[in-house]
Image (cartoon, rainbow, N blue to C red):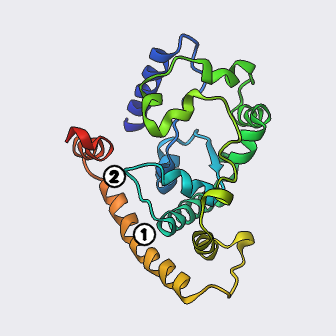
Amino acid sequence: IYARVCLQVYAYHASANSPSPTMVLGDKNPLYSRYLPLLQDLFPQARFIYLVRNIKDNILSYQQVYFDMRKTADLAWRWKKYNREIQESIKRFPHKYLKLSYEDLARNGEHELTRVTEFLGILYDPVMMSFSSKPADRTASLGWHQNLTRKLNTSSIDKWKTDMGDEEIRLVDFIEPPGGKRKDDATISIRLKALQSLLKTQVYSFAEKTFYELPLPIRARLSNQLRNPDKR
């Protein structure tokens, strides 16, 4: 019953925001990586699009969001944890997942979107690429969703090469080594920062899951206070 109610809510939202018939219902939230087994049980027909971004650019992006974690090491550990949990689910149900690269999507959107439509079993329509020309809704007015009204572009690819400091780069490379092989040249300072952050991130991860077990009215109120501090 819960799953049917959820689908009805999404279907209503889709019909209220578009005159076209709804072929597929979808939602995007990085937090879903923590609940993939549950989502697969609730929605056995669901397909999952795994969009992964360069860890360093992902960190820089999250550091622009005022209500989230800000420290480089904390965000690196979270990126690693989320992606590992997704990869574990892919091993169990590989046919339910399509992996996309943020960088490939930004560089060659039409090709990647064609892959998505084939995966979902629907026909590709060039109008799908004109999303940026649609009137902005309330979601797009939120600062962290402002790119919803912009065309796909490559301006945020490899920003870490100019915007991330050398020590932060070494710290991220220690937590998530490029190519998967960790070097042994990390300084004691880097190792201590990474360990301290790991312990802190594990506590945060537990708190995050606990938060999302709270009743919706309480969770919504707390979320609004975090995202709108001026309205407290």
Residue at the image point whose x is 51% and y is 33% from the top: 146
Query: Front-most of 17 and 165?
Result: 165
Q: Work out how far the residue at label 1 is from the one at label 2, CA to CA, in angstroms.
A: 16 Å
Query: Front-most of 174 and 96?
Result: 174
Q: Secondary structure at mark 2?
A: loop
Q: Residue furthest left?
A: 232
Is residue 214 rendered to the left or right of residue 56? left
Is residue 74 rendered to the left or right of residue 169? left
Judge whether 177 appears above or below 13 on screen: below
Residue at the image point whose x is 22% and y is 38% from the top: 231
Look at mark 2 in the image and give the residue it sits on.
212
Residue at the image point whose x is 45% and y is 22% from the top: 137
Residue 27 point in image, percent of width and height: 51, 36
- Quarter occupied by residue 155: top right
Quarter holding the N terminus is top left
Query: Front-most of 37 and 213?
Result: 213
Q: Which mark is residue 99?
A: none
Quarter holding the C terminus is top left
Instruction: Identify the amino acid type marked 1.
Output: Thr
Residue 207 point in image, percent of width and height: 33, 63
Instruction: Identify the amino acid type marked 2.
Output: Tyr
Look at mark 1 in the image and give the residue it sits on.
201
